[in-house]
Amino acid sequence: MNGHVLRMNNVGVRRGDTELLRDVTWTVEEDERWALIGPNGAGKTTLLRIAATHLFPTNGDVEVLGERLGKSDVFELRPLIGFASAALANQVPEEQGVMDLVVSASYGYLGRWREEYAAPDLDRAHTLLAQWGADHLRDRTFGTLSEGERKRVQIARAMMADPELLLLDEPAAGLDLGGREDLVRRLGELAGDIDSPTLVVVSHHVEEIPAGFTHVMLLREGGIVDAGPAELVMTADNLSATFGLPLKVEHDGQRWSARAV
Ligand SMILES: Nc1ncnc2c1ncn2[C@@H]1O[C@H](COP(=O)(O)OP(=O)(O)OP(=O)(O)O)[C@@H](O)[C@H]1O
């Protein structure tokens, strides 16, 4: 795999006359942790869905975990990719049990109960729920969970199959301040662990970039404003161009913040 987890070359996505993405050239190496930041409609989710092999681009080349999209069996690739998004959460039936949802990820389907789950898989599901602060929810159904609780359970599920690449679309959206800070701290711990999968997290807010995230891509109107090491990309000029208003950017050594000037 020569270290490249993701490689995109001149990727574009077009729907009718609308360009959802254009000229995206991007490489992600194994030990990198990326945040994709941009305003509503910038194309972040579209880009993440391509990385997850859920969407084929209209043009350009994509390699995920060394396999070329269009030339490989995505059903062999997908178990190696953990993916959590609001769209996936919406596909989970309300009555789905939390444990079933998490443990079934290693069996390749969306949470149907099987009698023959292996004990090590059940143990791993418990451990992951605990790691994401959701162990107390394991006897609940997905439909009874709050927004923040759903996010934690979804991340535990995405981690279940021990992925090589973990893609999280707006994991902190809809969380209150305490919930956001708790989740961002846990993501920071994951980022700092050398055994963690390669991470790509989408957000609208620079405050949600966890500590330890090494790289940032800024997206606006389907195009890359800048992408690379966080300390080079996260300038006031770049952020202002991305969000279309003059911004002041601060970094306290761990986390970023931005506000209008
Ligand atoms: N099938 C489609 N046809 C036309 N436009 C589409 C289609 N799917 C998405 N779009 C548009 O493409 C743009 C990019 O959408 P995308 O969901 O990737 O953006 P995003 O950066 O994730 O936005 P948000 O932060 O609001 O979730 C949006 O303007 C959206 O309305």
Image (cartoon, helix red, strand yellow):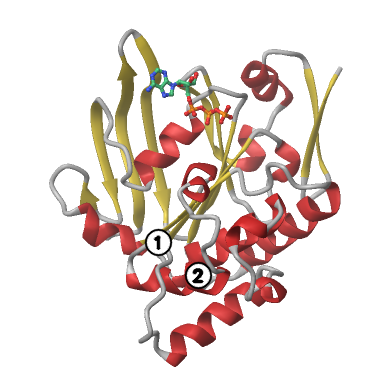
Q: Quadrant of the N terminus?
A: bottom left
* Pick the front one: 149 or 127: 149
Does 17 sit above or below residue 122?
above
Q: Report helix, strand or loop for mark 2.
A: helix
What residue do we see at 54% from left, 69% from top?
A: 97
Q: Earlier in the sequence, mark 2 or mark 1?
A: 2
At label 1, counting other C-alpha atoms closer than 10 Å, the crowd grade (few under 14, some 14-19, many 20 or more) is some
> Please, is residue 24 above or below residue 54 in the view?
above
Q: Which mark is residue 190?
A: none
Residue depicted at x 39% and y 84%:
117
Q: Quadrant of residue 23?
A: top left
Residue most toward the top? 17
Q: Amino acid at mark 1?
A: Leu
Residue 182 coordinates in the image, percent (x, y): 78, 59
Residue of label 1: 110
Answer above or below: position of 70 versus 109: above
Residue under label 2? 102
Give the left or right position of residue 40, taking residue 209 as reference: left
Cβ atoms under marks 2 and 1 closer than 8 Å? no
Q: Is residue 64 above or below residue 31?
A: above
Q: CA separation, marks 2 and 1? A: 9 Å
Q: Nearer the viewer, residue 26 or 111?
A: 111
Quadrant hosting residue 244: top right
User: x and y percent of residue 194 in the render?
Assistant: 54, 71
Q: For the point 48% across and 54% down, which residue is it?
A: 92
Total residue callouts: 2
